[in-house]
Image: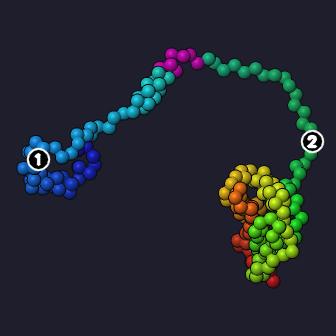
Amino acid sequence: MNSLASKSPIVEGIIIRILNTYPIQLETKEKHVLDADLVPKIHEKIIARENLQESMIHAEEVSQVKPLQLQVSNKIISLQPQEPPKPSEKPWETFKKILPMLQDPFVSYIECKGPNQPLSVIKNGRTQVTSTFMDRGEIDEYLKYLSEKTRVPLVEGVFNVRVDDYTINAIISNSIEPSFIIKKNLSGAMAYPR
């Protein structure tokens, strides 16, 4: 009884009461419990790892550390003006079908339910069906482009990314057609400008 629970006066009192109440049952030679080794056995891999660590420690003590020698070269580095970095291209700017809806301040939600189905938007709090369609190739190309830009792998299942002020959720599966939802993140801003 080396555990902290056995050192508790409450547990100790309970054990003493049990031993005093049932002394006859403890004296019987019948065993109703399988013999168990209470000391946990150490796994062979743990022993091998400890032996390896000890041998590495001894090897480090034996090996001599060589002093670090640096050689300085007389190379001249010329600083040439570099081109300014290009502004980052936003994923939706390459897809002209979605861009007008994203730029509309009254649109808060864009949903594509699948290829060749009209896009629906929530504009001014009302759901509206647009006359804009995307085929399977355009949806796949858009999701692939988002995956490359955000460096989130495009795997089967749910694809969630956040780009600037937009959250894009897509469902990708071999058994059903791909679909996606674009939500504008309106945190801290008014949903509808006056």
What residue lies at 89% left-to-right and 51% top-to-bottom? Answer: 86
Q: Residue furthest bottom?
A: 194
When asked about the image quadrant of residue 121, the answer is: bottom right
Residue pointed to by mark 2: 81
Which image quadrant: the C terminus? bottom right
Is residue 143 a member of the stretch shown in magenta?
no
Q: Residues within 10 Å of mark 2 (few under 14, many from 20)?
A: few
Which amino acid type is shown beneath numbered disc 2?
Answer: Pro
Which amino acid type is shown beneath numbered disc 1?
Answer: Leu
| Relative vertical location of residue 69 with respect to residue 164 in this rendering, above or below | above
Q: Residues within 10 Å of mark 1 (few under 14, many from 20)?
A: few
The CA span between labels 2 and 1 is 90 Å
| Relative vertical location of residue 11 with respect to residue 180 in this rendering, above or below | above
- Asked whether, in this view, residue 112 is left or right of residue 81, the answer is left
What residue lies at 58% left-to-right and 18% top-to-bottom? Answer: 65
Residue pointed to by mark 1: 26
Q: Position of residue 97 (x, y in %)?
A: 88, 67
**Res 41 visible:** yes
Q: Position of residue 51 (x, y in %)?
A: 43, 25
Is residue 60 a member of the stretch shown in magenta?
yes
What residue lies at 47% left-to-right and 25% top-to-bottom? Answer: 52
Q: Residue furthest front?
A: 175
Judging from the image, the colouring scheme is rainbow
What residue lies at 10% left-to-right and 53% top-to-bottom? Answer: 22
Give the residues in magenta: 57-65
Secondary structure type for disc 2 = loop
